[in-house]
Each structure stands twice: as C-alpha cells, then as structure tokens.
Amino acid sequence: MRIVITDLSVIYERGLPDERAAVSGVTLSVDQGESVAIAGPTGSGKTSLLEVMAGLVAPTSGTAALEGADGTLRSAVGLVYQFPELQFFEESILDEVAFGLRHQGAAEEEIPGIVRNALARAGLDPGLFLDRSPLSLSAGEKRRAALACMIALDRPFLLLDEPSAGIDPAMRERLVKFMLDMLEEGCGLVLVTHDLELAGRVAGRMIILSDGRVVADATPDSIFRDAPLLERLSLDPPPRYQLVNRVKSLAASKAPELERLLLPSVGRHLADVGRR
Ligand SMILES: Nc1ncnc2c1ncn2[C@@H]1O[C@H](COP(=O)(O)OP(=O)(O)O)[C@@H](O)[C@H]1O
Ligand SMILES: [Mg+2]
C-alpha cells in the first residue's frame, strides 16, 4: 500500500487578490513501512502537503491517491496536527479518543478496550486518565492524549506535524520510541519537523520543501552533509554533522593553509611513532 502524489499543486484563495500557491508541482510517494521526514522553512507548504496526503484537502491540480489497496486516503491515513490539543472538545478523555472510533463505525462495546489500549501506548495510565477532562491535562499529557486518538484509529499511515514542538526531553524520547514501534509494526510514517536530530533517528528518507517545491529527496545522511542547502533554508543539522560540515568547508576554503598547518604535525607524529 502506498500514498502516491503526482504533480500536486495546492493554491489557496484562487482567483482572489491574495491567491497563494502553497504546494507547486510536487511528486512523491510513501510506502507502508517507510519512514519519511519532511523539513523546510515556515510557509514552505509542509502542512498543506500533509493535508492532501491525508485526504483532507483536495489538490488544485495533480493527483493524490492510495495505491495497492481499496479505500481512500482519508480512511487509510491519520494526521496529527501541530498542537493537536487545541482541537479537544469532548468532556472526557474516553470520549475524546472514542470520537474518531465512533465516526469510523467501531462497535460500541469494543470502544472502551481500544481506548484503554491506545492510552497505555501513548503513555497515559487508562485508570487515571479515562474520566479526566482533556482540558485539565498538562501540555505533555495533552500531546499524549492526541497521539492516543490516532493510535486508536489504527490507520496504516500516520502523519505527524511538528510532533516535538513544545515538548520536554522525556516526552521527546517517548515519541521516538513510539514512532520506531509504529514502524516495526509496518505502519508508514511521515514526520514534519524542524528537529533534524529527531528526523535522523527515525526517518530512512528525508524531503526538503522550499516555496512549495521539493528541493531534496534523499537519505538523511546525505542531506545533513549538504551544508549549503541547510544554510540557505536556515535548518540546523544534528550536532555531529555541524562539526563535520565545518571542517569540510574549512578544508575546502583553506586547503593550502591547512596542509601547511597539519602536515608538519602529522610528520612529527609519524617520526615519534617511528622512534618508539
Ligand atoms: N487555509 C489556508 N488559506 C490560505 N492560505 C493558506 C492556508 N493554509 C496555508 N496557507 C498558506 O500557504 C502557504 C503554505 O502554508 P503551510 O502549508 O501551512 O506551510 P508550512 O506548514 O510549511 O508552514 C503559506 O503561505 C500559508 O500562509
Ligand atoms: Mg505547518
């Protein structure tokens, strides 16, 4: 099963003075079992692209389809928005998580069991949280409850929009573990994030968007080594790549100088080794 996007464009306010192309000519596909990270500056079209992949926004032109299975993108893909906790509206966590299940047509007697399981997987003790009001939770707990809403739906694809924005390091670790577990179970994962360290830990492939267009689609490793690209888009690679890239650019710009500086010391070192 795969999500296939072909020559996709999304234009908002079409025909109006503030018409704006959010996505322009994007072609890509995501397989079940694959993990793809998407990064790019604010306004580069990441959320719009996710909304199309989830079947929530229709393409202005081009196509978005589910291939290799019956059903629609909407039924196969779960999207967790950035700050999903802003969308809670039920009186209890039980009803909040059950909402999507009911909408999906789950049998009423199965719902409590599914909700309990989803809460536990998201890191919330069902015994303590089922009857709480979503609005009474801490920020981290709200994020977990939002995740539970999606886990309960058990879709083959899960799209997460900036899941690490505004969470503490412990929750971030939990999120990584959660994503790796979902992958292991064969879920397809699309992760929109500025956090390239997080992306490097869970994604096998990385897509960079700029102005609604794909400017890179490659392994995280090769993108993290592309210092000019990252710099142009104000993205910080994981710390160890920052060092590698810095040494590389120094070496390129100051090769003769470096050689003059380094060679004598290397020579001395070899001479030392030779003496021993
Ligand atoms: N519902 C909308 N109506 C009008 N313009 C929108 C809407 N959603 C997004 N945009 C515009 O489309 C562009 C891409 O936005 P978005 O997809 O949210 O990018 P990102 O998630 O990368 O920040 C931006 O210029 C944004 O202002
Ligand atoms: Mg966004």
Image (cartoon, grey):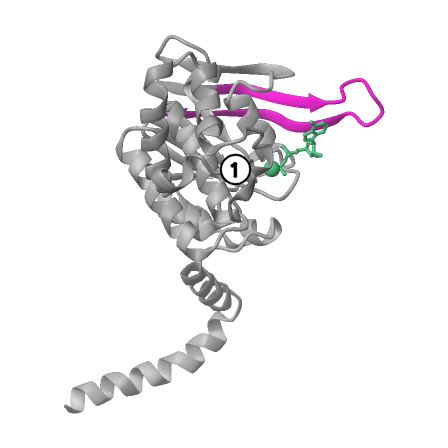
Q: Is residue 82 visible?
A: no
Residue located at (27% from left, 31% from top)? 185
**Is residue 30 in the magenta section?**
yes
Q: Is residue 187 left or right of residue 142?
A: left
Q: Could you say where residue 159 lies in the image, as x and y percent from the top left?
A: 46, 31
**Which is more toward the observer, 128 or 72?**
128
Q: Nearer the viewer, residue 121 or 234?
A: 121
Rendering coords of residue 6 (x, y %)? 52, 18
| Residue extending furthest toward the right | 17
Magenta residues span 5-32
Please give left or right for residue 242 compared with residue 121 in the image.
right
Q: Please tell me which residue is depicted at 42% across the width and 76% down the height of the picture.
A: 259
Secondary structure of the residue carrying numbered label 1? helix
Most foreground residue, 271 or 120: 120
The residue lying at 35 percent from left, 11 percent from top is 69
Q: Is residue 167 left or right of residue 106?
A: right
Image quadrant assignment for residue 119: top left
Amino acid tagged 1: Pro
